[in-house]
Image (cartoon, rainbow, N blue to C red):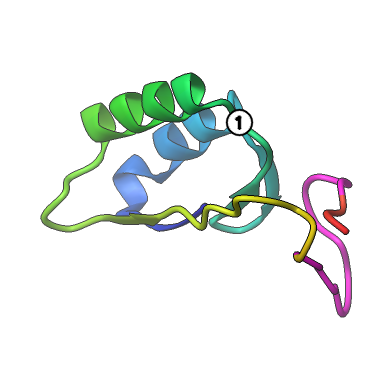
Amino acid sequence: MVYDIAEERVNKVLKISRKYLDWIQNSVLEGEITKAKFEKLKVELRKVINEEKDSIIFYILRTTLYSEKEIIGRTKGGSKLII
């Protein structure tokens, strides 16, 4: 999940998102989540954001079989690697 949220709402979005996903770095979270929890996350986020001004993008991988993550530089946030 990546987001671009107005400053006055960004802490609320991060707090909600961290209940379901692992924070990776500024405006980026990742993790495995059930469909039910994903729907709950979206409901909670919609209550906080301004859909005219804010943006949240979810990248949904159907399998981790073909995914790979490579980090250059300092690792921030969560320590999980999806390989």
Question: Does 8 appear in magenta?
Answer: no
Q: Secondary structure at mark 1?
A: loop
Residue 35 in percent (x, y) is at 48, 27
Question: What secondary structure prevails in the magenta region?
Answer: loop
Question: Does 71 appear in magenta?
Answer: yes
Going 51% across and 58% down the picture, which residue do you hit?
A: 59
Apparent side of residue 26 relative to residue 65 in the rendered image (left or right):
left
The residue carrying pointer 1 sits among few (fewer than 14), some (14 to 19) or many (20 or more) residues within 10 Å by Cα, namely few
Which quadrant holds residue 21? Answer: top right
Residue 46 in percent (x, y) is at 24, 34
Q: Quadrant of the C terminus?
A: bottom right
| Amino acid identity at mark 1 | Ile
Residue 75 in percent (x, y) is at 86, 62
Please give the residue where the numbered disc 1 appears in the rendered image.
Answer: 33
Observer-nearest residue: 83 or 11?
Answer: 83
Residue 71 in percent (x, y) is at 85, 73
Observer-nearest residue: 56 or 34?
Answer: 34
Q: Which residues are magenta?
A: 67-80
Going 16% across and 49% down the picture, which residue do you hit?
A: 51
